[in-house]
Amino acid sequence: MAPDFTLPDAYGSEVTLSDLRGRPVLVVNFLGFGCVHCVEQLQALVPVADRFREAGIEILAVGLNPVEDVRESLGDDPDDTGFPFRVLADPSLAQFKAIGDGRDAIGTPCNMAPEVFNHCYGPMADMWSLGCVVYELVTGEPPFDPYKLPADNPEYHLKRNVRAA
């Protein structure tokens, strides 16, 4: 069971996870609206959100932007945000930190150095990640896109692709 949290949305309402206990909730953590891939992930949920709702599953997106930035990204009309689910603000990382101590949060898969997969890393792994970000800024594509991997075992294929680089 996920730890309880209370977070604001962009329009002055708060959502408390314990108020939703007894029914399934999909909590989608994302870095914020400045992260192109994060927004793409949220947009990928839009066409299937009705199926989640029909199955009784509520979707909550939790981003790291302040409330003001979330509102700027979503617009002034809460009924026309572009997302058929609530987007919550967690700039202090309270919800994210409550999930665990952060030791398993080691990076974005498409930017991770090979040694990071084995939890053995240091400053050179950061240089690898920086190189991946620069590559993406120049080309517009991540060097290793985890969303284009074979579905049979995506973790294996991502590790294989990264280690081959």
Image (cartoon, rainbow, N blue to C red):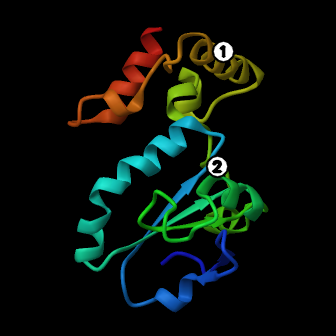
State the CA–CA distance, disc 1 to disc 2: 19 Å
For the residues labelled 1 and 2, say whether their Cβ atoms are less than 8 Å apart: no
Residue 91 seen in render: yes
Give the class, few, some or many, for how many residues have Cα within 10 Å of label 2's Cα (few <14, many ≥20): many
Residue designated by label 2: 32
| Identity of the residue drawn at 53% across and 17% down | 140
Image quadrant of residue 9? bottom right
| Position in image of residue 139 (x %, y %) | 54, 11
Image quadrant of residue 48? bottom left
| Identity of the residue drawn at 52% across and 45% down | 39
Front in this rendered view, residue 101 or 67: 67
Q: Secondary structure at mark 2?
A: loop
In terms of sequence position, does the residue under pointer 1 or pointer 2 come before the other? Answer: 2
Judge whether 89 appears above or below 38 on screen: below
Between label 1 and label 2, give the one nearer the viewer: 2
Give the class, few, some or many, for how many residues have Cα within 10 Å of label 1's Cα (few <14, many ≥20): some
Mark 1 residue type: Val
Mark 2 residue type: Gly
| Identity of the residue drawn at 73% across and 55% down | 69
Taking the image as shown, residue 23 lies to the left or right of residue 127, namely: left
- How many numbered tags mark residues here? 2
Judge whether 54 appears above or below 42 on screen: below
Q: Secondary structure at mark 1?
A: helix
| Position in image of residue 132 (x %, y %) | 60, 18
Front in this rendered view, residue 19 or 165: 19
Judge whether 76 appears above or below 138 on screen: below
Taking the image as shown, residue 52 lies to the left or right of residue 155, namely: left
| Position in image of residue 52 (x %, y %) | 28, 69
Front in this rendered view, residue 70 or 76: 76
Judge whether 3 appears above or below 100 on screen: below
Front in this rendered view, residue 75 or 140: 75
Residue designated by label 1: 134
